[in-house]
Structure formats: structure tokens, C-alpha cells
Image (cartoon, grey):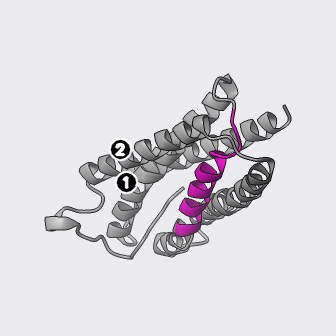
């Protein structure tokens, strides 16, 4: 899953680039706190049947928006790999999916708080670990994307290709794994 914002790298506060590992680490700490808060809320809130039903509708909608955005983004990357798109075209196309992917993930986390997950279940804990890994992967993917944008149409190095492939693989494993576990948990 590649994410992008603009066609050129931006500087952050005091000239620190947005793709610095300090910024990425700060976002990771914030995301970790947010996910921990969501788990705490899920463990301490008892929702009514109406709220759970609404939460399920939001959860399924967020899954379509977020995972659908990821699958579409990956289809652009596959078209680039097949030589049907240039890298700048691919990054622009994927960039338009940045907001839906993150909104979908946020919607899944927020709505999951009212679905009364069984936090003692190994499957649920595995799903939460996948969501955590997915979130961290998405954060570092932003740094990767900025580096790719900065290169323009220059050929990618083997290191950047491997980084991109690993990012996409982790994304797919986490999204599919969390989705399958969610489906299996819903049947019990």
C-alpha cells in the first residue's frame, strides 16, 4: 500500500522532512496510543443492540472504503510493474486513495469499539496485532512514498523496490488476515 500527498517532498517544522524517521516514529507512538485507547474503550463499554447494529454497519462500510482503497492502490502498482503506467502516474493515482484508506482504517477501529470483541480470544488478539502492524506499515509507507516521489521518473534502486514490495506484502497479509478473522469471529 503506497500513500502519497504531493508531487514533491515537503519540509516539516524547522526544515525537518516529513519522511524523517523521527516523524515516522512520532506518528507510530500516536497510533499506538490511539489503538490502545480503542482497546480500552472496547473492554469497558457495553453497547446496546441498536448501537452494535449501527457499529456493524459502519464497520462493514469502513472495510469496503479502506480495504477497497488498498486493493485499488495495489492494482495501480501492478499496472506500473507491468509497464502500463509510469511511476509518477502511479504515485498520483495512489495518492488520491490516501484519504479513503486512512478513513476506512479509522472507521474500522472506531466502530470496533462498540462491537464487543472478545479480547480474551486468541483470534481477536491476532486480529488486533494485524491492525497494529497494518497501521505501522501504513505510516512507514508514507515515508517510502515521499522518497519515491522525490525520485521522479528515475529508475528505482533494488533497495527501494524491496522496500515497496515488503510494504505491499505486509499490507495485504494484514488486511486479508484481519478481514478473515473478523468474518470467522462474526460466525461465533
Residue at 31% over, 46% down: 25
- Vertical comparison of 31 with 8: above or below: above
Q: Which secondary structure dominates the residues rendered in magenta?
A: helix
- 10 Å neighbourhood of mark 2: few (<14), some, or many (≥20)? few
Pointer 2 and pointer 1: residues touching (CB < 8 Å)? no
Residue 116 covered by magenta stretch: yes
What secondary structure is marked by label 2? helix
Query: Residue sitting at 66 percent across and 31 percent down?
Result: 124
Q: Looking at the image, which residue sits at the far right? A: 187
Label 1 CA crowd tier, 10 Å (few <14, some 14–19, many 20+): few
Labels 2 and 1: the sequence-earlier one: 2
Which mark is on residue 157? 1
Decide if residue 99 is on the left or right side of residue 124.
Answer: left
As drawn, is 87 to the left or to the right of 152?
Answer: right
Q: Residue at x 73, y 36 (%)?
A: 181
Element at label 1: loop
| Residue pointed to by mark 2 | 29
Amino acid at each position: 500500500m503506497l500513500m502519497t500527498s504531493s508531487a514533491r517532498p515537503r519540509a516539516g517544522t524547522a526544515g525537518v522532512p516529513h519522511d524523517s524517521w523521527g516523524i515516522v516514529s512520532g506518528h507510530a507512538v500516536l497510533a499506538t496510543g490511539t489503538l490502545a485507547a480503542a482497546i480500552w474503550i472496547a473492554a469497558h463499554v457495553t453497547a446496546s443492540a441498536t448501537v452494535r447494529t449501527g457499529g456493524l454497519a459502519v464497520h462493514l462500510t469502513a472495510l469496503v472504503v479502506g480495504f477497497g482503497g488498498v486493493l485499488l492502490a495495489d492494482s495501480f502498482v501492478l499496472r506500473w510493474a507491468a509497464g502500463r503506467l509510469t511511476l509518477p502516474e502511479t504515485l498520483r493515482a495512489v495518492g488520491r486513495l490516501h484519504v479513503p484508506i486512512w478513513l476506512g482504517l479509522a472507521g474500522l477501529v472506531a466502530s470496533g469499539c462498540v462491537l464487543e470483541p472478545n479480547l480474551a480470544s486468541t483470534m481477536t488478539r491476532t486480529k488486533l496485532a494485524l491492525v497494529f502492524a497494518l497501521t505501522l506499515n501504513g505510516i512507514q509507507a508514507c515515508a517510502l512514498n515521499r522518497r519515491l516521489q522525490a525520485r521522479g521518473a528515475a529508475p528505482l534502486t533494488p533497495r527501494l523496490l524491496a522496500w515497496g514490495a515488503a510494504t505491499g506484502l505486509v499490507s495485504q497479509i494484514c488486511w486479508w488476515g484481519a478481514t478473515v478473522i473478523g468474518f470467522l469471529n462474526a460466525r461465533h
